Amino acid sequence: MKTIAVVSTAGGTGRTTLSAALAVLLARRGRQVVALDFDPQNMLGAHLGIDGFAPAGIAQALLDEAGAWHTHTWRNAEGVLFVPYGAVSLAHSARCDARLAAEPQWLANALAQLVLPRDGVVLIDTARYPSQQADQAVRCADLVLCVTPPEPAACATLVAQLDALRRDGANLRIIVNRLNPARDMQRDVLAMLAAALGNGLPLAQRVHLDVALPESFARGTWLFDDAPHSQASHDLHGLANWLDAWVAGTPATAARGHGERV
Ligand SMILES: Nc1ncnc2c1ncn2[C@@H]1O[C@H](COP(=O)(O)OP(=O)(O)OP(=O)(O)O)[C@@H](O)[C@H]1O
Ligand SMILES: [Mg+2]
């Protein structure tokens, strides 16, 4: 089983969108996929096509209110097994955070209870980093996908947190999302980000901006079904192919070929 954490140091970068899309695309490639919502926003279920917000999930297990965390699972139409965070009030959210702070291995212990084949995948959507949820996810992940738009503020926060992420995360990969090649400023920001990251961390994976993406979400469909030949669909398939090859243990470079260039 491979664990992939989807994190970002800014809000609204596309973590939940990418977590849901990649979960479905990996399931369509025959992987057994668990999508775990580790963000109190509790939004991943909506992206996976499950109506409404799941009332109970990881949070209620953290609060000792509703049994084991894995009793609150759903399966979506694509066969993805989904674990919600669950609905929380502000006070409950603080209690969940306190428990996670007191038990830094809570998520690792929870994932150890999963029975998945060697090539099964757990995709974790996280609260914005730094947070208790993102910190735990980064520490248990085999691969950390760090999502950032090519915007100055988002990239600045990423660079500021890079040392902390590198300390915690074994295998970090930057995903540039909402790329718009028509904007010169984005090219400059990406060049600055690449320089700050250094040679060890290539900016190989990119997903282009596509205004049809939020529209597909609103309709309850997938962009890669609605507009399979769009650049963003091509990018998402490229990213899923790369992940699929990484999960299978084949050299990552062999599966690239989509979404590499502006
Ligand atoms: N490549 C893209 N092109 C266009 N819109 C996108 C793209 N990726 C994500 N979005 C849109 O950006 C918005 C934020 O995405 P999302 O909710 O996935 O981000 P997030 O990082 O999970 O946010 P939060 O910090 O609130 O959890 C959504 O409206 C989503 O549809
Ligand atoms: Mg989100």
Image (spheres, grey):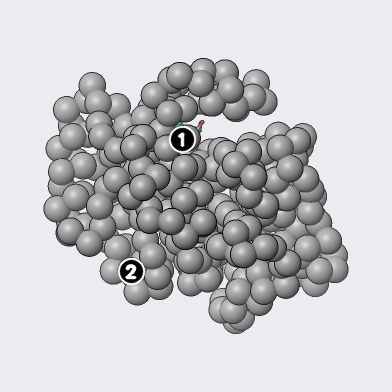
- Element type at mark 1: helix
Vertically, is 196 above or below 238? below
Counting the numbered discs, the total is 2
Of circles 1 and 2, the one toward us is: 1
- At a point 75% along the width and 35% down the height, the residue shown is 77
x and y, in percent, of residue 63 in the image: 75, 69
Looking at the rendered image, the quarter that the N terminus falls into is: bottom right
Choose between 147 and 123: the one closer to the eye: 123
Crowd tier of the residue under label 1, counting other residues whose Cα lies within 10 Å: few below 14, some 14–19, many 20 or above: many
Q: Nearer the viewer, residue 99 or 215?
A: 215
Question: Upstream in the sequence, badge 1 or badge 2?
Answer: 2
Looking at the image, which residue is at 60% across and 74% down? 108
Q: Which mark is residue 166?
A: 2
Q: Is residue 199 left or right of residue 203?
A: left
- Mark 2: give few (<14), some (14-19) or many (20+) Cα within 10 Å: few
| Residue assigned mark 1 | 236
Q: Tag 1: residue type?
A: Leu
Of residues 83 and 156, which is closer to you in this image? 83
